Amino acid sequence: MKLFTCDACGQVIYFENSRCLRCSARLGFDPGQARMVAVAVVDDQRLIDLREGTRRLKLCANAEHDACNWLLDHADTGSLCRACRHNRTIPDLSYGPHLDAWRRIEVAKKRLFYTILRLRLPAPPPGTPGAEALVFDFLAEPPHGPKVMTGHDKGLITLSLDEADDAKRESTRIRLGEPYRTLLGHFRHEVGHYYWARLVRDAGQEELTRCRALFGDERRDYAQALQAYYDHGAPQDWQRCHVSAYATMHPWEDWAETWAHYFHMVDTLEMAGAFGLRVAPDLAGGAMEAQIDFDPHCVEDIHRIIDAWLPLTYAVNSINRAMGLPDLYPFVITAAVKEKLAYIHALVRRAAGDA
């Protein structure tokens, strides 16, 4: 994520801001330019980009619910922004807790789409001819029906509104023995399943063979693998080849977990670079030093990302511990995981036309 400032007054602003807290200018995110824009409100349907003068924009229709701050070109015939047009189902907003949960979900989803757009990955919205669209259902638990399961199926990502409830999500995290569980993490994991289909399955047999050599054979029975995981857990030596315990469950989950960590890395490193962070502890050898002065979305060699990521995580984990908090990044990147990350990095660059 970049560091943004208000075009009107120069105040540092967050990606989620719809108003500048210093000058009260109306703000919105322009996905085409990947920047936060201060706008002058001409009327309910028309906004003017303050920096570019006569450029006309409009708010996403979901701004009405305070659930989106993204912008569209005024000439766009649609009413939903580049991210919101992927929603197939949203909850009943007349019920206040549903609205609050959906707003939290949209915050995380917008960060997901920021990375998708910055990496120039294909993400066709519903109705795109000849393409498996990326679609979202955000569902509340029915009072007397089956539990909503968060997951992915043929381009459709379903997310339970319970995941937006911090207490319920933390309870689930502890019950399942997970070191990390967030809304954004869910999105990054589930979209990984979508991109396995787009970048591996649809690429043909040669790509499938390369992927299976690293992650395993995805034709293995998923239901049996899931039951075995919940019955017996991960192997004791799981950290040698996997980024998380859950990644051992099935090759598809290994892929999705590794994909999610790739997204964690590029987004966090961009933010660290925007703040000019440098890790240079007073230690002999310099093994934990890193100068984060590059755009991780454009880096050719994955080792440049990893070499900066490891010192950064040591630093932020140590800072968290100084505050009595859990590690920000409670994972280990082994040689086998680095190889998997390198494979994903190469696929992403190829999909963007950079390799």
Image (cartoon, rainbow, N blue to C red):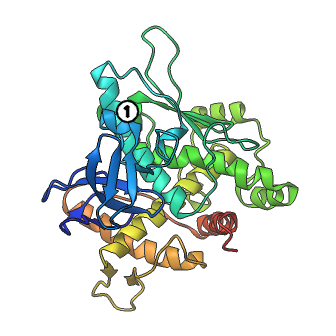
Give above or below for 310 relative to 112. Answer: below
Residue sitting farthest toward the left: 22
Q: Which image quarter holds the C terminus?
A: bottom right
On-image quarter of the N terminus: bottom left
Instruction: Give the camera-side residue of 110 and 336.
Output: 110
Report the residue at 78% width, 49% height from top: 217
Question: Image point 33% across, 80% down: which residue?
Answer: 279
Number of marks drawn: 1
Residue appearing at x 72%, y 60% in the figure = 214
Image quarter of residue 278: bottom left
Which of these two is toward me, 248 or 196? Answer: 196
**190 or 233, which lies in front?**
190
| Residue 96 position within the rendered picture, expressed as x and y whole percent measured from the top left | 28, 22
What percent of the width, then of the height, locates residue 201? 78, 50
Residue 343 coordinates in the image, percent (x, y): 68, 66
Say what amino acid the circle numbered 1 marks: Trp
Tell me: 146 left or right of 35: right
Instruction: Pick whichever, 288 or 156, lies toward us.
Output: 156
Could you say which quadrant of the image residue 55 lies in? bottom left
In this rendering, the answer to whether 337 lies above or below 275 is above
71 horizontally vs 135: left or right: left
On the image, numbered disc 1 is attached to which residue? 102
State which quadrant residue 270 falls in.
bottom left
Secondary structure at badge 1 equals helix
Residue at image coords 70%, 67%: 350
Up-down relation of residue 180 to residue 96 (above or below): below
For the question of whether residue 181 can be seen, the reply is no
Residue furthest out toward the top: 144
| Pointer 1 local density, CA inside 10 Å: few below 14, some 14–19, many at least 20 | many
How far across and how far down the image is residue 24, in percent?
16, 53
